[in-house]
Image (cartoon, grey):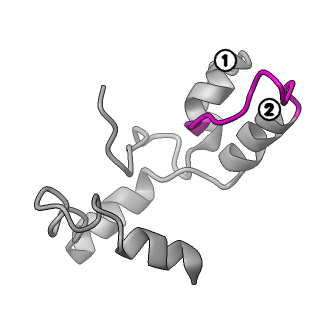
Amino acid sequence: REVLRTIFTSAQFRSPEAYRAKIKKPLELIASSLRAVKPEIVADSAHAILTRNSRECTGNFFIDDEVLREEGVEDMNQYAVDPNQDLFIDFFLDS
């Protein structure tokens, strides 16, 4: 409950830019799910983070594919639900 409360009361969630930003039509939901990733990407990146030196790796925000690339993983298609589809960024980051 606390996580949801934090999300729903955050300034980012209530910002004008976020208003209706993630509403998807059924067809869009199907299309994005085809470009989704398997849960193994989270497990593998979490393992990589948790085995790092905690004194050097704390207070950071991590993105799964970036962590895995730092670990030498080059083929992200192994994490794709459908390897024939391009992976889709499901949240927005400043580039």
Q: Are marks 2 and 1 in contact (CB under 8 Å)?
A: yes
Residue under label 1, please give it.
70
Please say if 82 is above or below 13: above
- For image coordinates 56% across by 37% down, the residue present is 61
Residue closest to the far left: 16
Looking at the image, tell me whether mark 2 or mark 1 is earlier in sequence order.
2
Please say if 60 is above or below 72: below
Residue under label 2, please give it.
48
In the picture, the disc for residue 61 is none
- For image coordinates 32% across by 68% down, the residue present is 29
- Dot 1 alpha-carbon crowd within 10 angstroms: few under 14, some 14 to 19, many 20 or more: few
Is residue 17 rendered to the left or right of residue 75?
left
Amino acid type, label 1: Glu
Quadrant holding the N terminus: bottom right
* Residue nearer the viewer, 86 or 69: 69
Q: Quadrant of residue 55?
A: top right
Amino acid type, label 2: Ala
Magenta segment includes 67: no
- For image coordinates 53% across by 41% down, the residue present is 83
* Residue 36 x, y percent position in the rendering: 48, 53
Magenta segment includes 57: yes
Q: Quadrant of residue 51?
A: top right
Please say if 53 is above or below 47: above
* Residue 18 x, y percent position in the rendering: 19, 61
Is residue 68 rendered to the left or right of residue 35?
right
What stretch of residues is rendered in magenta? 51-64
How far is disc 2 from disc 1 in space, using C-alphas? 9 Å
- For image coordinates 37% across by 75% down, the residue present is 8
Please identify the dominant SS of the magenta region: loop
Q: Look at the numbered disc 2 and give the secondary structure of its residue.
A: helix
Q: Look at the numbered disc 1 and give the secondary structure of its residue.
A: helix
